[in-house]
Amino acid sequence: MGRKPKPKVEMILPDPPISAKPERNKGGRPTEYRPEYCDKIIEFCSRGHTIEAFAGSIGVTSRAVFKWVDKYPEFAHAKELAKAKAQLALEQIGLDVMHGLIPAKDFNATVWIFWMKNCHGWRDRVDISGAVDVDFHSKLIQQIEASEKGNVIDVEEEKK
């Protein structure tokens, strides 16, 4: 006496109505942003690191970090504070050397200067004040005025 097999039940579902919209794919990869990154970026950069280095330290691209800046206002604020703290840390090193707290022999000024220029916007000052050839400029104005009237004056020829 064996058991009788149970009859198979097949469920037939009706076709969806034609007007029904398919379920929409939200698309894209879920964000890797975490609210704790606000504190982490400040702490990490306060040692002199860049925003790009922070991205590497958490395993994302710098592009992802800068997208978070656009999307999350609290992270944008944290990033600005982190950048300021990074500059503070590096300026403090320069001041410590200047005041003799760090021996100059242990400090590479060239590397430090380039770091400050490339990462913190430092620039060499260019003095643009100086003597101006007033005579040349007045003749150039004369040339412009003459050309507006249809006459041509060669300033270089007049200088000779």
Image (spheres, rainbow, N blue to C red):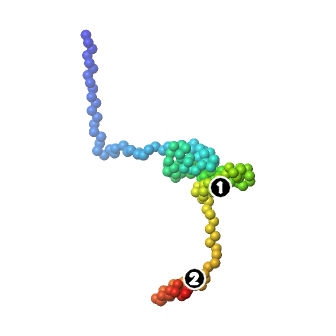
Residue 57 pos. (x, y %) = 55, 44
Residue 30 pos. (x, y %) = 46, 43
Residue 69 to residue 11: above or below:
below
Query: Which of labels 1 and 2 is toward the front?
Result: 1
Residue at x 60%, y 81% (from the top left corner): 133
SS at mark 1 in the image = helix
Between residues 106 and 3, which one lies in front from this camera angle? Answer: 106
Q: Quadrant of residue 127?
A: bottom right
Q: Name the residue under label 1.
A: 109
Q: How many marks?
A: 2
Residue at x 50%, y 45% (from the top left corner): 60
**Residue placed furthest toward the front:** 105
Q: Name the residue under label 2.
A: 137
- Rate crowding at label 1 as few (under 14), some (14 to 19) or many (20 or more) other CA atoms within 10 Å: few
The amino acid on which the numbered mark 2 sits, given as a three-letter code, is: His
Q: Is residue 132 left or right of residue 8?
A: right
Pick the quarter of the image with the C terminus. Answer: bottom right
Residue 117 to residue 18: above or below:
below
SS at mark 2 in the image = helix
Residue 104 pos. (x, y %) = 70, 52
Residue at x 53%, y 47% (from the top left corner): 55
Q: Is residue 64 left or right of residue 115?
A: left
Residue at x 27%, y 20% (from the top left corner): 6
Residue 42 pos. (x, y %) = 61, 47
Between residues 112 and 160, which one lies in front from this camera angle? Answer: 160
Between residues 151 and 113, which one lies in front from this camera angle? Answer: 113
Pick the quarter of the image with the N terminus. Answer: top left
Between residues 86 and 79, which one lies in front from this camera angle? Answer: 86
Residue 92 in view here: no
The amino acid on which the numbered mark 1 sits, given as a three-letter code, is: Ala
The Cα–Cα distance between marks 1 and 2, rounded to whole angstroms, is: 43 Å
Residue 128 in view here: yes
